[in-house]
Image (tube, grey):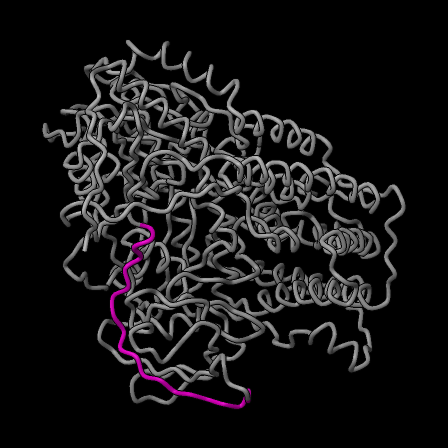
């Protein structure tokens, strides 16, 4: 019941650009946002409120205190950097500070739409102002002005004039960034203008479902940062991420200037098999079977994706503008039959490293790279294909292959693993211990129950290292913590893992709408993911906030970033302890730990990669402490020249190194059951590395104000969109799952000195704990 009537403090600024100027800057998005509540919005909202009150771990009633924090949470979800909404705007919305709880319980979501519209109007004002600056302003970079990239903790602008000054400072910063990259003035204008145009276009494509998702997630985040409301598209994405498959055509899609564009094709998918569609083709219409086509130009990307996805063995027809068409009026219609698309890149995979140790003798080390704990998960009303995905089953196959190929030790790499299925984490832990408690779980009423590994079978009993980082979270921390408590595995990595020690439950709303309330769900109403329990290790210590501390800590750029990890998230639950469970330690690590630490520390002290990293860490600390960035071109050029020189020296030094010794074999689940090993991968000295590249990236992210949680895309920081809002540049995985534009940087590159040191630690561990299995140097037959 948002009854307050209001007007903007100032009308949106309008500029009459000439056709030539408009051609240079690009056309302003003209699509208008129409936000009307959906037929089930009220019920969805009431259900979300009820689930929060009755099922959340805190059991906190939705009262005036929650209402007040809810208002702040929603405002920050839209305008995280305090760039757009004015103090004047917030003062008008103050009337709802003690009313949002009652409105939500009544199912009234009017404030969500009204506040979003105000935010969008401010964004349009910024767009018009920025376009005018780009066309008419002659920027000067000789003063001592400084720019504050991260304004989250600073007051919002008092009025439109103050907001314009902030917008002007940001555009000057962005202009200078491109100028330092040696772009010409006209090209800078195009680059920056296109960026702001994409942002505005993306936000003007938001519909009521998008706004409702941001609004209800802002409410759930008041309780804790891991409770969320999933709309239909996000629920579909969650399901795909858990089972690593979908039904569609197998195309990576992105939104570009109002068109749905093909980024690339998934190997073996219907699109690739057809040979009728290729990268950079633009999809302008989608039809189901014999039905009439639907025009998808200027349609929001996730809606296009919904049209393209569908049941297996059904037909979808796409009307395309071919990428190689000389005439843009050319159209081509193709027919594809949907099939299951498996996201094999996100499955567990393995490597075998051969380390020369004696003349004509090598020691083999195995590595299993596990990006997540995936498992079968089906949406309500969706039939399973009968084949349930399982992390544990996949890792067992990889372990059997590594054992067959006579590895002397194994590294389980969880550096990129943000969690997933609790059941899979427990089962996977059981592959390395005989039986016993893996994790303790505390209920809201204080009751504690223990999840045990009941299977006495051990899949691998040899030397084991678990490699972690600040991004190893949740299920990863359960596994690492359990293997550390049992003294079964050596934990190596950043100073701590992420610190997510909570259990979430997913409640799909469609069955409730249908069975309890007698309503037809119509379109999928989504789901509520809510925190219901807390994790504790067998030792009794919570993994919440503090995470798992490795036995051997390696230098890391992330350890110096105070806003990465659970402790940096708003409303994170507290750390505590409970009574330990009964379990028997295996005494595999403790006898050798002191010597392993001593050897590793000696290597790190003189290792040229870690010496370089320590220098980057110190520079990064300085960047964090300064909080502002110079807008003086001379000073920035000097800084850039120094950085470029460091990189040049670094590249030259790395390139001059001899080729790494020993062969490396990569194994996927497709290859793991074949005899022998595939050909070894090519070995080269790449400059890029997980640590050195991230050090450089983080310095840039600090300058952009994008250091909350894991680094995000540059445009997300430029717009000020905070947690709970979608990225401004929509890019998708096969048939439409959003991915970060910088996801390629998360892949472990060729020069990975953290992994190299971990391999040395494992070799020391093998030598100290028993005789290594040495093999004669031979060339294995290539897998056919």
Q: Residue 743, image x and y in percent?
A: 47, 51
Would residue 267 be found to the left or right of residue 572 on screen?
Answer: left
Q: Residue 123, image x and y in percent?
A: 69, 62
Residue at point 22%, 50% (across, down): 669
Q: Residue 213, image x and y in percent?
A: 47, 57
Residue 453 picture quarter = top left
**Can residue 161 be seen?**
yes
On whether residue 342 falls in the magenta region, the answer is: yes
313, 129: nearer the viewer = 313
Residue 697 picture quarter = top right
Residue at point 73%, 66% (across, down): 187
346, 105: nearer the viewer = 346
Instruction: Check the image and report above or below for 631 versus 602.
Output: below
Residue at point 62%, 31% (across, down): 616
Q: Residue 615, image x and y in percent?
A: 62, 27
Numbered range of the magenta stretch: 327-346
Name the image quarter holding the C terminus.
bottom left
Residue farthest along the left direction in this orientation: 456
Name the image quarter holding the N terminus.
bottom right
Instruction: Check the image and report above or below for 407 versus 122.
Output: above
On whether residue 431 falls in the magenta region, the answer is: no
Instruction: Check the image and report above or below for 418 versus 307.
Output: above
All told, the count of numbered labels is: 0
Residue farthest along the front direction in this orientation: 359
**Can residue 447 be seen?**
no
């Amino acid at each position: 019941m948002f009854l307050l009537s209001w007007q903007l403090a100032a009308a949106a600024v309008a500029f009459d650009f000439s056709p030539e100027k408009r051609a240079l800057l690009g056309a302003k998005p003209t699509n208008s946002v129409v936000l009307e509540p959906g037929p089930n919005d009220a019920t969805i909202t009431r259900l979300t409120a009820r689930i929060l009150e009755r099922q959340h771990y805190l059991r906190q009633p939705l009262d005036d205190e929650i209402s007040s924090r809810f208002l702040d949470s929603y405002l920050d979800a839209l305008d995280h950097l305090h760039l757009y909404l004015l103090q004047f705007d917030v003062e008008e919305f103050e009337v709802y500070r003690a009313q949002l709880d009652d409105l939500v319980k009544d199912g009234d979501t009017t404030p969500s739409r009204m506040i979003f519209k105000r935010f969008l109007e401010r964004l349009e004002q910024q767009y018009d102002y920025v376009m005018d600056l780009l066309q008419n302003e002659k920027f000067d970079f000789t003063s001592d002005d400084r720019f504050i990239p991260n304004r989250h903790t600073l007051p919002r602008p008092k009025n439109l004039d103050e907001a314009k000054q902030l917008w002007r400072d940001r555009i000057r910063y962005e202009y200078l960034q491109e100028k330092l990259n040696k772009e010409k003035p006209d090209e800078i204008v195009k680059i920056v203008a296109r960026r702001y145009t994409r942002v505005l276009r993306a936000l003007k494509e938001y519909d009521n479902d998008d706004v409702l998702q941001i609004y209800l997630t802002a409410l759930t985040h008041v309780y804790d940062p891991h409770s969320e409301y999933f709309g239909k598209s996000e629920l579909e994405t969650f399901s795909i991420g858990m089972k690593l498959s979908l039904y569609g055509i197998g195309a990576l899609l992105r939104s570009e200037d109002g068109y749905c564009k093909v980024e690339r094709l998934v190997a073996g998918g219907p699109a690739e098999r057809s040979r009728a569609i290729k990268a950079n083709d633009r999809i302008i219409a989608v039809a189901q079977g014999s039905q009439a086509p639907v025009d998808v130009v200027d349609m929001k990307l996730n809606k296009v994706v919904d049209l393209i996805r569908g049941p297996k063995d059904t037909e979808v027809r796409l009307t395309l503008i071919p990428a190689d068409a000389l005439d843009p009026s050319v159209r081509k219609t193709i027919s594809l039959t949907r099939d299951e698309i498996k996201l094999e890149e996100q499955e567990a995979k393995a490597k075998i490293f051969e380390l020369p140790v004696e003349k004509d003798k090598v020691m083999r080390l195995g590595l299993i790279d596990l990006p997540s704990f995936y498992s079968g998960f089906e949406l309500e009303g969706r039939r399973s294909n009968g084949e349930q995905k399982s992390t544990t089953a996949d890792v067992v196959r990889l372990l059997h292959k590594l054992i067959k190929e006579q590895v002397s030790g194994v590294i389980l790499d969880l550096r990129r693993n943000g969690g997933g299925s609790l059941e899979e984490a427990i089962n996977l832990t059981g592959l390395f211990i005989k039986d016993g408690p893996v994790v303790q779980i505390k209920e809201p009423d204080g009751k504690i129950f223990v999840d045990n590994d009941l299977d006495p079978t051990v899949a691998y009993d040899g030397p084991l290292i678990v490699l972690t980082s600040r991004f190893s979270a949740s299920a990863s921390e359960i596994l690492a913590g359990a293997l550390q408590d049992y003294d079964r595995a050596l934990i190596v990595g950043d100073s701590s893992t992420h610190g997510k020690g909570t259990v979430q439950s997913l409640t799909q709303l469609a069955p409730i709408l249908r069975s309890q309330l007698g309503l037809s769900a119509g379109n999928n109403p989504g789901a509520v993911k809510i925190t219901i329990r807390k994790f504790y290790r067998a030792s009794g210590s919570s993994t919440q906030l503090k995470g798992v501390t490795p036995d051997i800590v390696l230098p890391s750029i992330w350890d110096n970033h105070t806003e990465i990890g659970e402790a940096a998230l708003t409303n994170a639950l507290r750390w505590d302890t409970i009574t330990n469970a009964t379990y028997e330690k295996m005494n595999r690590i403790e006898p050798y730990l002191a010597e392993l630490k001593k050897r590793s520390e000696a290597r790190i002290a003189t290792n040229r990669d870690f010496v370089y990293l320590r220098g980057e860490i110190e520079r990064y600390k300085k960047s964090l402490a300064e909080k502002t960035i110079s807008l003086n071109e001379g000073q920035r050029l000097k800084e850039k020249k120094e950085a470029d020189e460091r990189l040049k020296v670094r590249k030259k030094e790395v390139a001059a190194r001899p080729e790494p010794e020993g062969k490396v074999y990569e194994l996927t689940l497709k290859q793991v059951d074949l005899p022998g090993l595939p050909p070894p991968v090519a070995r080269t000295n790449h400059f890029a590395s997980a640590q050195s590249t991230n050090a450089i990236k983080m310095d840039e992210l600090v300058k952009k104000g994008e250091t909350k949680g894991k680094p995000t895309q540059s445009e997300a920081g430029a717009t000020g969109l905070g947690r709970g809002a979608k990225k401004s540049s929509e890019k998708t995985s096969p048939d439409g799952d959003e991915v970060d534009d910088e996801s390629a940087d998360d892949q472990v590159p060729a020069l990975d000195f953290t992994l190299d040191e971990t391999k040395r630690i494992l070799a020391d561990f093998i030598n100290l704990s028993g005789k290594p299995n040495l093999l004669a140097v031979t060339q294995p037959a290539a897998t056919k």
